[in-house]
Amino acid sequence: MQVAFSVICVGLDNAGKTSLLRTLSNSQRMEIFPTPTMEIHYVICPKIGKYCLVYDMSGNGRHRASWRILYQDVQAMIYVIDTSDSEYRFHLQRHLIEEVLNDDLIKKSAIPILFLFNKNDKKNRFNKDDLIKVLGLDSKKFKNKFIFKETSSFEISKLKEAIDNLTDALFSKKQ
Ligand SMILES: Nc1nc2c(ncn2[C@@H]2O[C@H](COP(=O)(O)OP(=O)(O)OP(=O)(O)O)[C@@H](O)[C@H]2O)c(=O)[nH]1
Ligand SMILES: [Mg+2]
């Protein structure tokens, strides 16, 4: 298996990280539990016909500090947001995103970040453009390239498109 690049997948607990990565990596449908610390997925990047290795991190508060251990080993980030979350959790989310984006290692490497606005199959959810504002995702303030996509863990076509967009961003950044 040829691995072209590595990605860290982060976001609050219950966002749907493991669910969408299992859809993308064609893992057998099995019951989903909160990720204990980390899970690894190999995801095909249709554009380049190679795989990327995705570190699926636990979003639990106790484990978030371990995300940065991998920041130097990855070439991209996927940040998953549950669009049906509560107001309190969006508040928490804003602080967490601020912390990630202002981390010295993320600033220095300027890796592209794919923000997935997940659970878009739900009726009671916020739309992408409102959340971009609420979460302070102003790309002009950062060197990292931001990609925004609405997804559902159960719809593979949008997820594949998102991986294509990330692959494009990664390789255009390197030129
Ligand atoms: N409706 C809906 N539910 C989803 C979607 N994605 C995930 N879920 C549900 O959300 C819950 C949490 O999903 P996980 O994939 O475990 O979330 P996670 O981000 O990996 O959570 P941690 O491992 O705890 O950080 C599960 O009950 C999933 O079935 C989605 O796109 N739509
Ligand atoms: Mg998980």
Image (cartoon, rainbow, N blue to C red):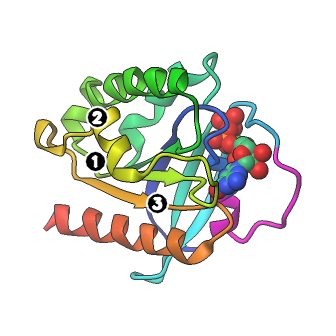
State the SS at label 3.
strand
Residue type of the residue flagged with mark 1:
Ile
Q: Please state the extent of the stretch shown in magenta in the rendering.
A: 20-32
In front: label 1 or label 3: 3
Q: Is residue 101 magenta?
A: no
Mark 2 and mark 1 in contact? Answer it, CB < 8 Å: yes
Residue at the spot of label 3: 150
Task: Calculate the distance from the C-alpha at mark 2 to the C-alpha at mark 3.
Answer: 23 Å
Does the closest atom of ligand 1 sit within 8 Å of the Cβ of label 1?
Answer: no
Label 2 is placed on what type of residue? Ile
Mainly helix, strand or loop, the magenta region?
Answer: loop
Of labels 1 and 3, earlier in sequence is: 1
Residue 42 point in image, percent of width and height: 61, 63
Instruction: Please rate how many residues cluster around mark 1, counting C-alpha atoms within 10 Å: few if below 14, some from 14 to 19, many from 20.
Output: many
Q: Earlier in the sequence, mark 2 or mark 1?
A: 2
**Residue 25 placed where, x, y %?**
66, 68
- On the picture, is 1 further left or further right than 105? right
Q: Could you tell me how far apart the alpha carbons at marks 1 and 3 are, in whole angstroms?
A: 20 Å
The kind of residue tagged 3 is Glu
Name the quadrant of the N terminus. bottom right
Residue furthest to the top in view is: 62
Q: Which mark is residue 111?
A: 1
Q: Which mark is residue 106?
A: 2
